[in-house]
Amino acid sequence: MEEWNHTTTGFILLGLFAPTKTGLLLFLLVVLIFLIAFLGNSTMIFLIYVDHHLHTPMYFLLSQLSLMDLVYICSIVPKMAFNFLSGDNSISVLACGFQSFCFLVIAGGEGLLLASMAYDRYVAICRPLHYPVLMNKRTCLLMIIGSWVSSSINSISHTVYALSMPYCKSRIINHFFCDIPAMVPLACMDTWAYEYTVFFSTNLFLLVPFLGIMASYGRVLYTVHLMRSSQGKTKAFTTCSTHLTVVTFYYAPFVYTYLRPPSLRSPEEDKNLAVFYTILTPMLNPIIYSLRNKEVLGALQRVSERVLSQKV
């Protein structure tokens, strides 16, 4: 293999699809998913911003989820599309660092944000009289800032360390973006200590919030079970099932990929699973929250009527 060091100008990404007719069809499907995700998340952010009926903690947190999904997909798919269409799979060190940083920020921040949303539903259903106090604007803002800041600190430390490692085995990354676990095997140094650090931070930003989500919804489901009103049960179950669907799509591939021992992982499997949380989930989130949410659909109708009335 070609030997090189950290002064080399960049890496080579193997990509997701081969340059064949089948690869082209799959690539066009990814582009379609990207457009749907971009439009859906942008629309969610816009609706939550302009419609005062959605100015609540739950939708404020949801707007941040849409923002994170936008950053997620926009930091990965455009570069992947450019590489596929141009036939040039190279990526500079700076662009690789940017991708790694964005991915780690959103991966960690979204886990914490989903835990915050679970806590919001717990307070709303289990302690409704205390909701205005426990989930006020200040608390909601602290949750948002905490998610972004803590995940950014974690991301900076991992990105800087990964790019400072000497790479001498190869500069070919078997992935469609700069995923640090796919880069570590290329380093010409003993990385076992760093791999334990990655495992620890993964548990901290994925497993701990996941346990918090499960605890919140365990309490919520128990409270819903005790409700006498069938209408109240239906509304609570609808809200919870929507959020739990998003949590499942987000956590299942992440946990399966990053919490397994390295000896049981394969680059191809990791790459295919990454499609779920980097491409599919950002598209599914706004669809799940809008199609099953009367308040969001109502906001879309009100904003549309307002726009049409101004044109007339």
Image (cartoon, rainbow, N blue to C red):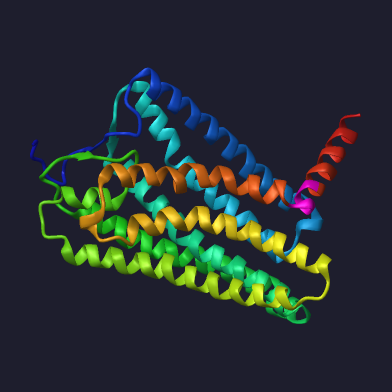
Question: Magenta segment range?
Answer: 293-297
Image quadrant assignment for residue 139? bottom right
On screen, residue 147 versus residue 261, left or right, reads: right
In the foreground, 6 or 302: 302
Q: Is residue 297 above or below residue 311?
A: below
On screen, residue 1 versus residue 63, left or right, reads: left
Identified at 39% across, 56% down, the residue is 104
Q: Position of residue 84 (x, y in %)?
A: 36, 26
**On the rendered image, what quadrant is the C terminus found in?**
top right
Image quadrant assignment for residue 236? bottom right
Q: Position of residue 59 (x, y in %)?
A: 69, 59
Q: Is residue 110 visible?
A: yes
Q: Main secondary structure of the magenta part?
A: helix
Query: Total marks drawn?
Result: 0
In the foreground, 270 or 188: 270
Identified at 69% across, 70% down, the residue is 137
**On the rendered image, what quadrant is the N terminus found in?**
top left
Q: Is residue 286 above or below residue 106?
A: above
Identified at 81% across, 75% down, the residue is 228
Identified at 54% across, 71% down, the residue is 214
Q: Is residue 221 above or below residue 103?
A: below
Q: Position of residue 52 (x, y in %)?
A: 80, 56
On screen, residue 280 versus residue 221, left or right, reads: left
Q: Is residue 178 visible?
A: no
In the foreground, 81 or 20: 20
